[in-house]
Structures are given as C-alpha cells and as structure tokens.
Image (spheres, rainbow, N blue to C red):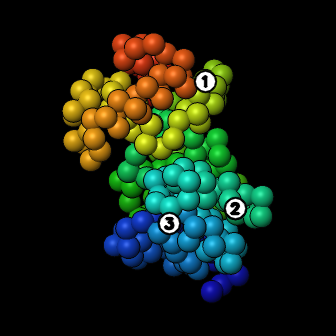
Amino acid sequence: MTDTAIRVVVVDDHAIFRSGLKADLDADLVVVGEAATVEEAIDAVSSTRPDVVLLDVHLPGGRGHGGREVIAGCAALLPETKFLALSVSDAAEDVVSVIRAGARGYVTKSISGAEISDAVRRVAGGDAVFSPRLAGFVLDAFGTGDVAVEDELDKLSARELEVMRLIARGYSYKEVAKTLFISIKTVESHVSAVLRKLQLSSRHELTRWAADRRLL
C-alpha cells in the first residue's frame, strides 16, 4: 500500500458483485474490508476505519433501513470516513434518504469501473458525486425545501415503503401481495398504516401524494 492509497470498504449483499467491484477498482484504491449486512458493515467500518465506504442502499439486517442505518451507526464514530452510495435504484426517495443520512454521493451500478474509481477519489477528496440523472432531483429536493418529504417517509417502515410505492403505481392488493410474497390481508394492514401515518384518506390521495413528490 502506498502513501497515496485510498482505503475502501465494499458493502453489498451480493458476493459476486463485491468480487467484481473489487476487481474493477484502480490499483490506488485498496479494499480493506467488505460486508453483506447492516451489522457486518458497521463492524467492518469501525474496525478498519476506511477513507471511503462503497455502500449499497438496500441491505439485510438491522432495523430494515439499509444503507442509511449503516451511516447512522458509523457517522458519530468515524466522521472522517466518507460514504458513497452505489445502488441499482434511482428512486428519488432512496437517493434523498441516503444523502440526508450523510452520504457524500450516489451513483448507479451501471457505471464503469473507471467511473466508480474516479467517484471514490473525488468523494475521498471531499467532493459530492452523483450520477448525472440523480443530481437534478437531489438539487431539487434540497434546494426547494422538499427535504420535508423525507420526514414523512421516515414514518414508514421498509415494508410499508414498498407497499406504498406499488399501490401508488396502481397495483391491486392481490398484485402487491404476489410481488412481495405476503398475504392480501397483510397488504391491507400495511396500506391502512401508510394512510394513517401520511394522514391520507384513500388510495387515490396516496397516488396523488406520491406523484406530487416524484416518488413513483
């Protein structure tokens, strides 16, 4: 390891993806740890104290809040560590959520090895880095006061968020149940909870609420 090496922890629940990502990173980016769950990630970051954490947004374990739970578990302990979210998701609520938690950037998994290496260097140097399409609505969210949307989303559990998004997109209860491998009764329960927490009275209002906030 050279004096200019950037120490990296890779967090993703797919071992094959972690292996591929490590192989794609440039030589000056040294992987000092990896993890597949929220708990493993917090332990790995705490024990290795990396410069940058490449963090998947959706992870098993913890209380169901994925990447932002990892950041919350490490930020106070390691303020010098930078977090770069790397995800297949480009949903507005995922991006705003993890940036608000403290990540310095958010890029999608479709980018090349050279691009992710460059993003890691820039984040390590203190820059904020986003995939081009994502930068626009991050600026919109933080520039127009829409961060309040995240306060509303924080009221929902991870499963309620999934149900909310599908219902807002027009899925029937039966379709939601099939998609999420849960019962229709459970879907109904989650929808009731979502409507109550968001202070909405119907599926129609939920769809309009989500559309207005560009969550579909």
Q: Residue at x 51, y 52 (%)?
A: 64
Which residue ends up furthest to the front in the rendered image? 185
- Image check: 176 left or right of 12? left
Decide which of 44, 5 is in the foreground and name it: 44
Residue 206's spot in the image, x, y percent?
Answer: 42, 19
What's under tag 1, amino acid-wise? Asp
Label drawn at residue 37: 3
Q: Nearer the viewer, mark 3 or mark 1?
A: 3
Whether tag 1 and tag 2 are in contact, CB under 8 A, the answer is: no
Secondary structure state at the residue bearing disc 1:
loop
What's under tag 2, amino acid-wise? Cys
Whether tag 2 and tag 3 are in contact, CB under 8 A, the answer is: no
Label drawn at residue 146: 1
Rendered position, 110 above or below 189: below
Q: Is residue 174 visible?
A: yes
- Image check: 66 left or right of 125? left
Indicate the quadrant containing the C terminus: top left, top right, bottom left or bottom right: top left
Residue 130's spot in the image, x, y percent?
Answer: 53, 45
Residue 146's spot in the image, x, y percent?
Answer: 60, 24
Q: Residue at x 70, y 81 (%)?
A: 3
Q: Is residue 122 visible?
A: no
| Whole-number angstrom distance, CA of label 1 to CA of label 2 | 26 Å
* Badge 2 or badge 3: first in the primary sequence: 3
To which quarter of the image does residue 141 belong? top right
Label drawn at residue 199: none
- Image check: 103 left or right of 117? right
Whether tag 3 and tag 1 are in contact, CB under 8 A, the answer is: no
Decide which of 120, 194 is in the foreground and name it: 194
Q: Residue at x 47, y 69 (%)?
A: 36
Query: Which residue is label 2 attached to?
Result: 74
What's under tag 3, amino acid-wise? Thr
Secondary structure state at the residue bearing disc 2:
helix
